[in-house]
Amino acid sequence: MRPSKREELVEKSLFVFDQLGFHATGMDLLASKIGMSKTSIYNHFRTKEDLIVDVLRLQDEQFRNWLFRRMYDLGTVNQGGPREQLLAMFDALAEWFEHENFNGCLFLKASSEYSDPAHPIHCQTVEHAEMLEIHILALVKKASMRLPDMVTRQLLVLKDGAISSALVGHTKSAAKDAKYAAQCLLDVHDTSKRKPVQTSFSF
Amino acid sequence: MRPSKREELVEKSLFVFDQLGFHATGMDLLASKIGMSKTSIYNHFRTKEDLIVDVLRLQDEQFRNWLFRRMYDLGTVNQGGPREQLLAMFDALAEWFEHENFNGCLFLKASSEYSDPAHPIHCQTVEHAEMLEIHILALVKKASMRLPDMVTRQLLVLKDGAISSALVGHTKSAAKDAKYAAQCLLDVHDTSKRKPVQTSFSF
DNA sequence: ATAATACTAAACTGATTTGTTCATTTTGAG
DNA sequence: CTCAAAATGAACAAATCAGTTTAGTATTAT
């Protein structure tokens, strides 16, 4: 069996679900949008749910590959280290937000439409979040940050927040704002810098 | 006509849509869940879309009332000022995340399920975001922050990110992480404090 | 009490949902 | 070429979708 047809099905479904949403995309509409018969779809996948889970698996792989590659490329110019790669995450996001097909995060969409934590589709989004966290945490540790676990979670909060803001506000500044916030966080937690001003008193 | 029935309809619909999602909630299911006949619903609202817009209007009012009230109450103990109120936003969020019925942000859900910027439902979420921004901006200015517009947007990015993280990761730490990030931001931009360490070099 | 208003349940559109069936055609490898 | 696997379109099922209609029951003000 040639693998190309099934992969093409998942790839094109990814695009359609991303643009229209999961519940809003019926199987007849999907079939016509991807130029494939419904019979073929159900030949490859038992249910719509199964297809969506595979779509999310592909998006997990594609998004992580793209993000980490882009973070590396943008972050290692001018002898940039792990810190610059972390900050480059927000430059990569900015590129994404500017893309004509940007329509929010597929995983936020999925966890919003299938919010039951026991649902397989929701589980897939949790898995994606965990995979992202592992990679970011490694960079944060390489960048010699205090409280690496917390800083990692904070960076991911900034990432999700930027995506949400970009979707609802159509504000291109979301990525830039998040990046500057991340800079502050990294500065404050950099072990190679003097302990910065504290909350309770002025310098 | 007594207004209570219509208000009750919108209030109960708000709960059901929040729990199940918009597309996933059919009108028959909605009618049975809120204990009201479908005929009555369509007597009050021409379409499902109209109902959802009103539901979002109510949620906008309720959420903002709750959040600002909670920020004020939590932020003004111990002679707290605008800065403490801003930080209290994340304590309020933490309370929300712990609530048994927490199921993410209804506006993020709405803008995700109706992502067309021209759609009335999407417009309602944009309006909500703008109203939030106005109030936060006023507090940021009162707190004597440098770059108040940017700091405001950053705080809102942290808010949305915390909500998203809390939904997908079920991590209660999301609010705490976001609060500490906000503290760093407010410290760095406080005009009454010495200019902190910068990005490009260690102090 | 009367009459208007609000509500109800239930049946009913016509379209759409997920998923199946079937007869036919396309495709690819030996 | 041959043959089996894979894909197709179209019809089909049963359920559900948004929304309407109908006929009848409460409520409420005059």
Image: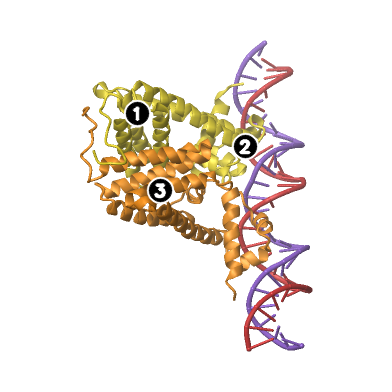
Chain colours: A orange, B yellow, C red, D purple
The quarter of the rendered structure image containing the C terminus of chain B is top left
Q: Position of residue A143 (x, y in %)?
A: 29, 51
Q: Mark 3 points at which residue?
A: A88
Question: Which residue is located at x 27 percent, y 49 percent?
Answer: A148
Q: Classify residue B127 as left or right of residue A157.
A: right
Label 1 is found on which chain of the structure?
B
The quarter of the rendered structure image containing the N terminus of chain B is top right
Question: Which residue is located at x 29 percent, y 46 percent?
Answer: A150
Q: Can residue B43 be seen in this view?
A: yes
Q: Residues within 10 Å of mark 3 (few under 14, many from 20)?
A: many
Q: Mark 2 points at which residue?
A: B119
How many discs appear?
3
Label 2 is found on which chain of the structure?
B
Q: Name the residue under label 1.
A: B86
Q: Which amino acid does label 1 sit on?
A: Leu
C-alpha gap between disc 2 and disc 3: 33 Å
Q: Where is residue A93 in the image (x, y as percent from the top left)?
A: 46, 46
Question: Which residue is located at x 64 percent, y 31 percent?
Answer: B45
Earlier sequence position, callout 1 versus callout 2: 1
Looking at the rendered structure, the secondary structure element under dot 2 is loop
Question: Which residue is located at x 25 percent, y 45 percent?
Answer: A190
Q: Nearer the viewer, residue A174 or A105?
A: A174
Name which quarter of the figure residue B79 lies in.
top left
Q: Which amino acid does label 3 sit on?
A: Ala
